[in-house]
Amino acid sequence: MIGILVVDDHPIVRLGLISLVETSQDMRVVGEAATGAEALRLYRATLPDVVLLDLRLPDMSGLAVLAQIRKETPETKVIMLTTFSGDVHILSALKGGAHAYLVKTAVRSELMNAINSVVNGKKVYTPEVSDVLLQHLPEMMLSPSEVKVLSLIARGQTNKSIARELAVSEDAVKSRVKGLFGKLNTDDRTEAVMIGLRRGFLELESLTGL
């Protein structure tokens, strides 16, 4: 039997995942959690074969939970489940050691196939995830300083106010803005913010100025 730990903070989603898993004769749910702390406690208590892990949890990032699981038992398979399809989220999960990354709109067959595949040592890239990665492979990732500038642009700050906040010259800010615009393939500040949100460089709820 494949033991599965289900981690999602939405009760309805969690119940749906549990019901789906329990339709299989060779899988069983060993625990369910709504927070990262609870997930780690149950993971250590049950040592599941597979963890279905939500990217966003109320107390910590799913990526932090993933990192801890990979540190303690690298053989445990982790499938990230999320509503976020931006390439930054996908790359972060895959670099962190996730064995699969599925959006929550994935059909039943995709999830069950993913579980069986990762148990057999395979990585799973759904067509949707592969398309996102291929779309952005030629593009360069933003540096931390560029992400910071983009977040300040998203809050409506001018180059002058950004320079003042970062304690750098206005010319330095203009250079960073030009660089990040080039990487995002736009010369419009509003469009740059929209691209940053879509790709996962920015999180909407963290931008209090929007």
Image (cartoon, rainbow, N blue to C red):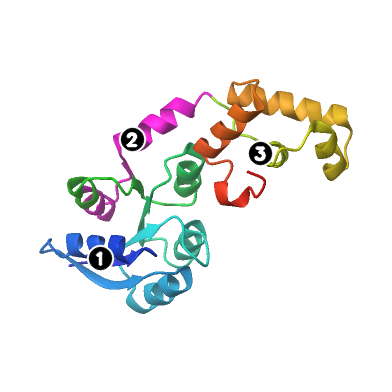
Picture coordinates of residue 102 (x, y %)? 33, 46
Q: Quadrant of residue 3?
A: bottom left
Give the secondary structure at mark 3.
helix
Question: Mark 1 highlights which residue?
Answer: 15
Residue drawn at x 29%, y 63% as measured from the top left: 12
Mark 2 crowdedness (10 Å alpha carbons): few <14, some 14-19, many ≥20: few
Q: Quadrant of residue 165?
A: top right
17 vs 132, left or right, is: left
Residue drawn at x 89%, y 33% as measured from the top left: 169
Residue drawn at x 48%, y 63% as measured from the top left: 65
| Of the pair 153 and 142, the residue shown nearer to us | 153
Picture coordinates of residue 46 (x, y %)? 32, 76
| Of the pair 82 and 209, the residue shown nearer to us | 209
Give the secondary structure at mark 2.
helix
Between circles 3 and 2, the one closer to the viewer is: 3
Q: Is residue 126 magenta?
A: yes
| Of the pair 208 and 122, the residue shown nearer to us | 208
Question: Mark 3 highlights which residue?
Answer: 154
Q: Which residues are magenta?
A: 113-138
Q: CA distance from mark 3 to mark 1?
A: 37 Å
182 vs 162, left or right, is: left
Q: Is residue 176 above or below residue 109?
A: above
Q: Mark 3 touching mark 2, by CB under 8 A? A: no
Question: Mark 2 highlights which residue?
Answer: 128
- N-terminal-most mark, 3 or 2: 2
Residue drawn at x 37%, y 37% as measured from the top left: 129
Q: Mark 3 touching mark 1, by CB under 8 A? A: no
